[in-house]
Amino acid sequence: MSTTPWTLRRADAADATAITECAVEAFRHYIPRLGLTPIPMTKDYGAAIANAQVWVAQQEKRIVAALVLDITEEGFLIDVIAVRPAQQGTGVGRALLELAEQEALRQGHDSIHLFTNEKMTENRALYERIGYVEYKRLALAQRTRVFMRKPLK
């Protein structure tokens, strides 16, 4: 099949509720492992759409994945990537990660970074497989964040 079953586009304000639902679906299985609610489940996606760079993958009329990009003091950030469980393994997450890298380069950045919970081991393994390298850990009250960066040039 030469065409993908989804379309990637910039999110607009009307997408906020669907993005929240997508993030809740994508991250809720981590609650027992983490003993807390993952931050992407409680993020204000309306504010993210207004203040950051939010993309969605849409299949027919349904948002199946979402990506929040931002520019921070550390550079170009993948803030959230969320894929509904039924679409995991279809390539949509990889397509969003590639889009993030293209956007970072297009906007003049030579690397891209993200952070994830140290207990989200499968996410860390995926990021390592595609070229991200851990550069910092930050112990917070109830979680430890693992920061990873990928050079793009």
Image (spheres, rainbow, N blue to C red):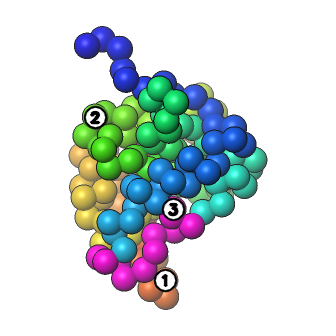
Q: Earlier in the sequence, mark 1 or mark 2?
A: 2
Verify CB contact (< 8 Å) between mark 1 and mark 3. Answer: no
Residue drawn where x is 56% and y is 47% of the image: 18
Placement of the C terminus among the 4 image quadrants: top left
Query: As drawn, which residue projects farthest toward the right?
Result: 50
Whole-percent x, y for residue 41 in the image: 51, 64
Considering depth in this image, is 2 or 17 the residue closer to the camera?
A: 17
Tag 3 residue:
40
Tag 2 residue:
90
Whole-percent x, y for residue 85 in the image: 32, 49
Neighbour tally class for label 2: few under 14, some 14-19, many 20 plus, Cα within 10 Å: few
Q: Which mark is residue 93?
A: none
Confirm whether the magenta stretch covers residue 110: no
Verify CB contact (< 8 Å) between mark 2 and mark 3. Answer: no
Tag 1 residue:
140
Neighbour tally class for label 3: few under 14, some 14-19, many 20 plus, Cα within 10 Å: many
Amino acid type of the residue tagged 1 in the rendering: Leu
Q: From which residue to which does the magenta span run?
A: 32-42
Residue drawn where x is 72% and y is 43% of the image: 13
Mark 2: secondary structure = loop
Q: Is residue 108 above or below residue 21?
A: above
Cα separation, mark 2 vs mark 3, equals: 21 Å
Mark 3: secondary structure = helix
Whole-percent x, y for residue 136 in the image: 42, 68
Occupied quadrant, residue 95: top left
